[in-house]
Image: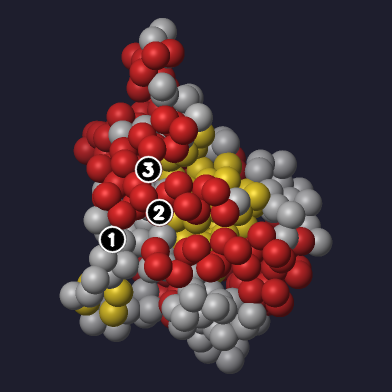
Amino acid sequence: MVWKKEVHLEYLEAGADILVTSSYQATLPGFVSKGLSIEEGELLLKKSVKLAAEARDKFWDAVKSNPLRGYNRALVAASIGSYGAYLADGSEYSGYYEPDVNLEKLKDFHRRRLQVLVEAGPDLLAFETIPNKLEAQACIELLEEENIKIPSWICFSSVDGENAPSGESFQECLEIINKSNKVNAVGINCAPPHFIESLICKFKELTEKFVIVYPNSGEVWDGRAKRWLPSTCFDDDKFELFATRWHDLGASLIGGCCRTTPSTIRAISKVLKERE
């Protein structure tokens, strides 16, 4: 797993202040379906946090004595992907789950993974690519039921730039999040970057929580064919330009999701830290 630590180190070198663990699609049912035991799956989840933390500590030990380089000691966010990400059928971008997928089923699906990741000691929890209000509610209730003390964020995806993938309005989705003191930030991940400006404005009207955005490159994922479709995408220069706009509109955390690279983060980090 040395190569995975090297990936984290590349992002730190590029100026990342938060490392997201490689656990987005890592689930205990998924591991079991591939022949691993529950115990082996739990160890892999914990290792995703351990690798990121080790990379962070190694990097910080090397740069902390030189503040002129402009690095911060990064935080490790444990990634918790949606139920749709586990299904790997594109439903994290449609918000459509089978009729038997209710609140309790979603909580049962997420509960043990959440417990294991928390035990591994991350600095943050990142619920990512949530497609509907029901799953957001499940995440919030789990944080309450498990009495989680670690700061967390919940990010939705969006396919129309207006609503959650399910078609539910963000006003509906954020109403339940605003009632929770367990969620510190809310936002958008893995949506096209040209949606982000208007969505920041919408979220700033709907919540007093920190707003986080980390769009993909603008390419489109075909969940059934499991491939990226040719499409117009943002290059690093555009991310650099738009990151300043997103920050000025009120986004507190800005990054990149699928099909972005360390050079994307370098461009974002450079322009934002120069302004500071």
Residue at 60%, 63% in the rendered image:
201
Mark 1: few/some/many CA within 10 Å (<14, 14-19, 20+): many
- Residue 143 falls in which quadrant of the image? bottom right
Q: Is residue 111 above or below residue 270?
A: below
Q: Earlier in the sequence, mark 3 or mark 1?
A: 1
Q: CA distance from mark 2 to mark 1?
A: 10 Å
- The one nearer the camera, 157 or 114, is 157
Work out which residue is located at the far bottom of the displayed protein and give it. 99
**Residue 24, horizontal then vertical, whole percent:** 43, 57
Three-letter amino acid code at the position of disc 2: Phe
Q: Is residue 185 above or below residue 132?
A: above
Image quadrant holding the N terminus, namely top left
Q: CA distance from mark 3 to mark 1?
A: 13 Å
Q: Secondary structure at mark 2?
A: helix
- The one nearer the camera, 184 or 90, is 184
Work out which residue is located at the far left of the displayed protein and give it. 230
Label 1 sits on residue = 234
Q: CA distance from mark 2 to mark 3?
A: 9 Å
**Residue 227, horizontal then vertical, whole percent:** 22, 74
Residue at 70%, 74% in the rendered image:
171
Label 2 sits on residue = 242
Q: Secondary structure at mark 3?
A: helix
**Residue 29, horizontal then vertical, whole percent:** 45, 66
Three-letter amino acid code at the position of disc 1: Phe
- The one nearer the camera, 39 or 192, is 192
Label 3 sits on residue = 268
